[in-house]
Image (spheres, coloured by chain):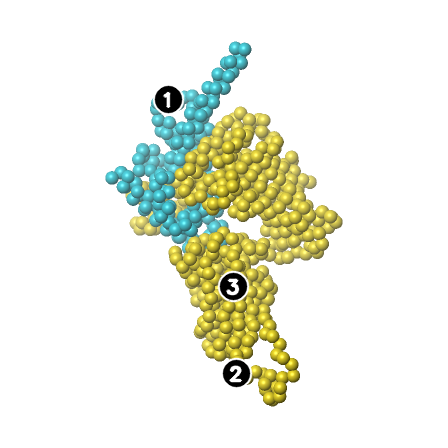
């Protein structure tokens, strides 16, 4: 009987611990992914390092001190995991040299404000024509190969990339304006 | 340092297509300039948030499984919560399922979801039914949502709407995708086996173990796949197979007749078909497209003229663009007579950047020297009207009558666009173009008969005017499938 009660308590504690972890992870993961995107050359790399960092964080969750910043803790783990990953893929021409990597990682780690956030983006996407909005989201969807979309558009790849970049620029300018207004 | 050039290099890096030289230039810019680093970080952050929104909107579309007929949900706030929960669920699956059930599931999960869209229903082993992230359902061992990254055991996936699609990757790297209203059951007990009850299935198959080809069963055929890329579409009484790479063996169920289908070939099997191979290729340039040509002044003859994607009837369609570099046209070889009634019809569908106000413009013209390269004079421009639904093919038709001005000249026809809004870069798809002529002699004009009969009364009444097809089906490549 006592053994069964102990098992139930343990299961209940595990559930609570798991729920707390997932809640924190969901809250902080977007910023970690955004940070990794500025270091790692492809989304596959970002996904792999994010998953690895999440797993490490879960395994070490007992070490995390309640009341301290989970975001900062996760960020540190992600930075280390990214560095480990970089060593594996350093030969790729897309991977930044060590000094550039360090500069970007250092500056991104220190940033707590001025992040491009989803709420800004949604407002600015709403200002695009529906077809432009759909196109921009389409080419940013996981698994979508931009070159294939370009070929189906009947345009040259270069022309297609320019259109996408122009849309990104319009949206980014709008987002930065929103951030500026928010901070004014 | 030009901002525009810096931004182009950043975009190329983020898209993984930067050259070695540009990569080095970009890195030097990042070393030297705080401003460049800020710009880089902003674009990287934007890329991350765009992907987050794009992915969670894709997930959000699945929540319409509960019966809403509304098109794609455009406000993503609610979906973000669902998406975030789905991400959490995905991570939860990764952390808990993988950690706790890794051993148990090692022999059960056979594939991973790598992409999905639209309304889908998944029925797993044991009859678990999973419809989407918004449904009130009990969690399964795998997840109570279908989301990217989820591992699945064998089961049945059903696309419930024309825009539904679902991509799977098997543990050997083979990938498969269903699209539209399709039902696919799959399993892998050492040999991959599928049953396509209806709809379309595309696959890119890694080399399979010797003696264990991938098997795909449809109502009328069995396909044996060793390692290749192909699309298969199954109906109740027929199966169409199109092979992009490699070779697929197709066996008719009722008589065991077999055909090997090589790359770039299509075969349609019914109970009585002759199982003949047809050569096809996914995209064709203008020079591979008989009769039609690109007559725009900046026309690139190496650009895509027709394609198989976004099809109307499983065959090629003509790619239309608002851009000046594309203007499909043909010399009909028909000599116009005064009073000719030209009637045409076609089906069309909007593509990227096509705005609701844009239209197709059919132009009938003559030239100063009866050659398509001559100076054109357009005598009729007929608009298609606007589309009511951008995602499906709609029919359009029109007509015009020739006058004495055009008589005795050669008829040329062009399929142009009429901008109604937005930038001049919209794309549309057009298929099954049909043009016919009916000659109605104008009253008072002498007819050939008058001269032949030299004023004697007509022995018989004149036959009623009959329509003659100028373009349509395989006549003058009206279906865009000829090669």
Q: Is residue B400 above or below residue A141?
A: below
Which residue in the structure is indicated by mark 3?
Answer: B397
Q: Secondary structure at mark 3?
A: strand
The picture places residue B414, in percent across and down from the top left corner, at 49, 67
User: Marks 3 and 2, how far apart in space?
Assistant: 30 Å
The chain ID associated with circle 2 is B
Tell me if mark 2 has few (under 14), some (14-19) or many (20+) residues whose alpha carbon lies within 10 angstroms of its own: few
Tell me if mark 3 has few (under 14), some (14-19) or many (20+) residues whose alpha carbon lies within 10 angstroms of its own: some
- Labels 2 & 1 near each other (Cβ < 8 A): no
Most foreground residue, B74 or B46: B74
Which residue in the structure is indicated by mark 2?
Answer: B444
Using the rendered image of the protein, determine whether residue B214 is visible from the camera's viewpoint: no
Q: Nearer the viewer, mark 2 or mark 1?
A: 2
In the rendering, what colour is chain B? yellow
The chain ID associated with circle 3 is B
Q: Earlier in the sequence, mark 3 or mark 2?
A: 3
Using the rendered image of the protein, determine whether residue B255 is visible from the camera's viewpoint: yes
User: Marks 2 and 1, how far apart in space?
Assistant: 99 Å
Which residue in the structure is indicated by mark 1?
Answer: A66
Discs 2 and 1 share one subunit: no
Residue furthest left as drawn? A184
Q: Which mark is residue B402?
A: none
In the image, the chain rendered in cyan is A
Q: Is residue B405 above or below residue A144?
A: below
Tell me if mark 1 has few (under 14), some (14-19) or many (20+) residues whose alpha carbon lies within 10 angstroms of its own: few
Q: Secondary structure at mark 1?
A: loop
Residue at the (52%, 76%) spot, across then down: B339
Residue at the (41%, 42%) spot, across then down: B75
């Amino acid at each position: 009987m006592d053994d069964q009660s102990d098992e139930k308590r343990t299961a209940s504690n595990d559930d609570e611990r798991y729920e707390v972890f997932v809640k924190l992870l969901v809250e902080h993961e977007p910023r970690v992914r955004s940070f990794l995107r500025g270091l790692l050359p492809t989304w596959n790399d970002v996904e792999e390092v994010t998953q690895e960092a999440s797993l490490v964080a879960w395994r070490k969750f007992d070490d995390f001190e309640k009341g301290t910043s989970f975001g900062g803790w996760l960020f540190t783990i992600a930075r280390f995991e990214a560095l480990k990953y970089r060593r594996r893929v350093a030969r790729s021409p897309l991977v930044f040299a060590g000094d550039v990597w360090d500069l970007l990682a250092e500056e991104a780690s220190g940033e707590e404000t001025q992040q491009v956030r989803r709420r800004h983006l949604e407002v600015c996407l709403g200002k695009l024509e529906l077809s432009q909005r759909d196109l921009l989201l389409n080419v940013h969807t996981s698994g979508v190969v931009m070159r294939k979309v370009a070929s189906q558009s009947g345009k040259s790849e270069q022309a297609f990339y320019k259109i996408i970049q122009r849309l990104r620029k319009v949206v980014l300018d709008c987002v930065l304006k929103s951030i500026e207004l928010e901070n004014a | 340092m030009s901002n525009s050039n810096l931004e182009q290099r950043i975009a190329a890096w983020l898209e993984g297509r930067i050259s070695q030289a540009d990569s080095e230039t970009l890195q030097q810019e990042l070393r030297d300039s705080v401003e460049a680093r800020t710009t880089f970080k902003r674009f990287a952050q934007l890329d991350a948030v765009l992907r987050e929104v794009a992915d969670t909107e894709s997930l959000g579309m699945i929540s319409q499984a509960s019966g809403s007929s509304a098109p794609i949900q455009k406000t993503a706030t609610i979906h973000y919560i669902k998406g975030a929960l789905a991400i959490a669920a995905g991570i939860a699956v990764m952390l808990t399922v993988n950690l706790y059930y890794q051993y148990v599931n090692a022999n059960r999960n056979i594939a991973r979801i790598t992409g999905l869209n639209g309304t889908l229903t998944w029925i797993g082993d044991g009859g678990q039914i999973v419809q989407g992230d918004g449904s009130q359902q009990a969690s399964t061992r795998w997840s109570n949502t279908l989301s990217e990254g989820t591992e699945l055991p064998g089961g049945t996936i059903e696309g419930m709407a024309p825009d539904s699609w679902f991509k799977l990757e098997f543990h050997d790297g083979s990938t498969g995708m269903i699209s539209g209203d399709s039902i696919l059951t799959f399993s892998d007990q050492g040999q991959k086996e599928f049953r396509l009850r209806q709809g379309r299935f595309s696959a890119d198959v890694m080399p399979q173990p010797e003696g264990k080809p991938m098997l795909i069963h449809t109502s009328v055929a069995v396909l044996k796949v060793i390692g290749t890329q192909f699309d298969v579409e199954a109906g109740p009484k027929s199966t169409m197979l199109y092979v992009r790479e490699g070779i697929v063996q197709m066996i008719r169920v009722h008589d065991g007749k077999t055909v090997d289908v090589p790359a770039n070939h299509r075969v349609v099997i019914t109970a009585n078909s002759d199982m003949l191979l047809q050569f096809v290729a996914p995209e064709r340039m203008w020079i591979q497209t008989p009769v039609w040509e690109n007559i725009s002044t900046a026309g690139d003859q190496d650009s895509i003229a027709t394609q198989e994607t976004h099809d109307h009837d499983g065959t090629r369609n003509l790619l239309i663009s608002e851009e000046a570099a594309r203007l499909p046209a043909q010399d009909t070889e028909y000599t116009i007579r005064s009073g000719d009634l030209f009637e045409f019809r076609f089906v069309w569908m909007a593509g990227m950047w096509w705005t609701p106000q844009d239209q197709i413009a059919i132009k009938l013209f003559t030239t100063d020297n009866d050659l398509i390269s001559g100076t054109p004079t357009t005598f009729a421009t007929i608009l298609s009207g606007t589309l009511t639904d951008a995602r499906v093919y709609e029919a359009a038709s029109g007509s015009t009558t020739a006058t004495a001005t055009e008589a005795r000249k050669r008829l040329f026809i062009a399929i142009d666009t009429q901008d109604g809004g937005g930038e001049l870069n919209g794309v549309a798809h057009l298929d099954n173009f049909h043009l016919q002529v009916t000659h109605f002699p104008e009253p008072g004009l002498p007819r050939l008969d008058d001269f032949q009969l030299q004023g004697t009364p007509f022995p018989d009444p004149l036959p009623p005017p009959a329509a003659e097809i100028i373009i349509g089906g395989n006549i003058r490549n009206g279906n865009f499938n000829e090669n």
